[in-house]
Image: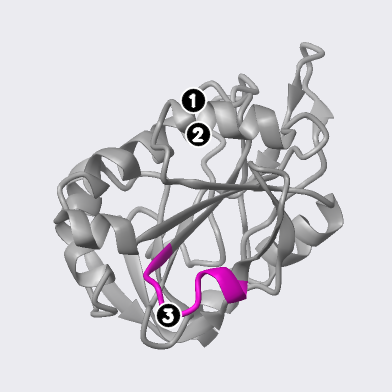
Amino acid sequence: MRKKTFAAAALLAAATLTLTGCGSGDQGDKAATVVSGQTAQRAATVLDQPFDKPELVLTDTHGRKFDLRKETAGRPTLVYFGYTHCPDVCPLTMNNLAVAKKSLPRVEQDELRVVFVSTDPARDTPAELGSWLKGIDPQFIGLTGDFAAVQAGARSLGITVEPTRKDKNGKLVSVHGTQVMAFSPKTDRGYVLYGEDATVDDYTKDLPKIVQGANP
C-alpha cells in the first residue's frame, strides 16, 4: 500500500484542482480532491486532521429519508460521489469496492457501510439508483436528492461537484471529484482518502483495518 500522512493544512493549500466528467470524452482530465501534486498519485492519504461527516439528509433507494450521520454512526463507512449514467470511473470504483468487500468476514461485510451519493439527482431517481447498485452490491446504500445539499456535502470533504451539463458532443455528464472517503467507526470522521487510481488490491489490503478504525 502506498500511503503517507500529510497535515490538513498542506491538503487545503493545493492550488489546482482537476475534475473528471465521467464518460465526457475529455482525455487526460484526472479527478483530484484537495491534495497536493505530491500525493495525487498515491492510492490513499491518511489525514492528520480528519473531516467531519457531512450533514446530509437525502432519499435512499427505497424512497425513505436517510440521515447520513445518524444512519452510519459508529460504523465503518465509505462515501463516494458519482452518478449511474457514468460509463467508466463510477462503476469501476464501486465494483472495486464490492470485490474488496467480499474478502472480509461476513460479520465485517455486514458492518461496513458503502454509500454512493448521486451527483446527478435529476436523472438518478431512487428506483434508478437502486437498480444500478443492486447489480453491484445489494448492501450498498444509494442516496439522491437536492443537488445543492449534495454539492455542499461533497464540498465539506474537499470534493468538488458541478451541476450536470452537456459536453461538446451534447451528452449529459456530471463533473465531479472521484475520491472515496473512509470514515472511522470510532470517531465518525473521514480520515483516509482514496484516489481514483486505487485498485481492488488496495482496498482489499486496507478494509480489514478500516472496519476497525485503524490506519491502513
Position in image of residue 132 (x %, y %): 54, 27
Q: Residue furthest top?
A: 169
Q: CA distance from mark 2 to mark 3?
A: 23 Å
Residue 74's disc number: 3
Earlier-in-chain disc, 2 versus 1: 1
Residue 96 is left or right of residue 142, and the answer is left
Type of the residue with mark 2: Leu
- Mark 2: which secondary structure? helix
Residue designated by label 2 = 133
- Crowd tier of the residue under label 3, counting other residues whose Cα lies within 10 Å: few below 14, some 14–19, many 20 or above: some
Magenta stretch: includes residue 172: no
Looking at the figure, which quarter contains the N terminus?
bottom left
Nearer-the-camera pick, 44 or 110 = 110
Residue plotted at (52% across, 41% down):
30
Residue 88's disc number: 1
Q: Which residues are magenta?
A: 69-77
Position in image of residue 157 (x %, y %): 60, 69
Do residues under tags 2 and 3 come within 8 Å of each other at their CB atoms? no
- Crowd tier of the residue under label 2, counting other residues whose Cα lies within 10 Å: few below 14, some 14–19, many 20 or above: many
Residue plotted at (54% across, 46% down):
31
**Residue 119, placed above or below residue 115:** above
| Of labels 3 and 1, the one closer to you | 3
Residue plotted at (38% across, 64% down):
39
| Residue 56 seen | yes
Type of the residue with mark 1: Asp
